[in-house]
Image: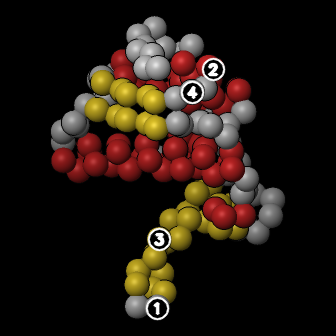
Amino acid sequence: SVNRYMGEFGARGMQIELSSQDADGKEVLEILIDNGVQPVLPIEAYSGGQNELIEDCIKKSLSDLAIQMRGVSLGLAAYDEPATNLEKVYKNVFLESLHTRCSDGRFPVTLVISHDQTLISGFNKRMTIA
C-alpha cells in the first residue's frame, strides 16, 4: 500500500522497498527507493521534500496495516509540522489524503499542528494558539 500512496502523490515511477539488515548486532530497517532511472538508492539520497513525501506514505501504509491486523482503528491521527518541505502541489495532495482518511472513518479525529498557511487554510475547523 505504500506504493499506492506514492501514486497518489504523482510519484508513480517510484517504488519503495523495505528490508532489514543486521548491522553491528542490531536489526536495522533500510528504506530503498527505485525511481526507475537511477540505481536503487537509500532514502538518505533524496531531498528533504522527497524524504517527507516518502515518510508520509510509509506512515500511512503502516497505519493501514495496523488496522488490517487488529481489525480496529484508534480513529486518531496526529501530525506535527507535516509537509513542511513539500511543494505546494504536494501539500494539497497531502491535505486531500488527510480529508479522505478522515471522512472514510479510518481517522475521524485528525490533529495537525502547523505554521504553514497552505495547510492551515485547508481545514474548516481549526484552533489558533498564540
Residue matched to label 4: 115
Looking at the image, residue 18 sits to the left or right of residue 111; the answer is right
User: Which residue is painted at 53% across and 37% down in the image?
Assistant: 82
Label 3 is placed on what type of residue? Leu
Residue 128: x and y in percent read 45, 16
Q: In what element is the residue under mark 1? A: loop
Of mark 2 and mark 1, the one earlier in the sequence is 1
For label 1, the residue is 24
Q: Which residue is mark 3?
A: 29
Label 2 SS: helix
Could you tell me how far apart the alpha carbons at marks 1 and 4 are, in whole angstroms?
Answer: 40 Å
Residue at image location 44% in from the left, 47% down from the top: 59
Callout 3: helix, strand or loop?
A: strand
**Colour pattern of the rendering:** secondary structure
Evaluate if marks 4 and 2 touch, with contact meaning CB atoms under 8 Å apart: no
Q: Which comes sooner in the sequence, label 1 or label 4?
A: 1
Mark 2 neighbour class, 10 Å CA radius: few under 14, some 14 to 19, many 20 or more: some
Q: Amino acid at mark 1?
A: Asp
Judged from this view, the residue extending furthest toward the top is: 124
Identity of the amino acid at label 2? Thr
Give the alpha-carbon distance from disc 2 to disc 1, as whole Å. 43 Å
Where residue 21 appears, as percent x and y from the top left, is 48, 81
Using a 10 Å C-alpha cutoff, classify the residue at mark 4 as few (fewer than 14 neighbours), some (14 to 19) or many (20 or more). few
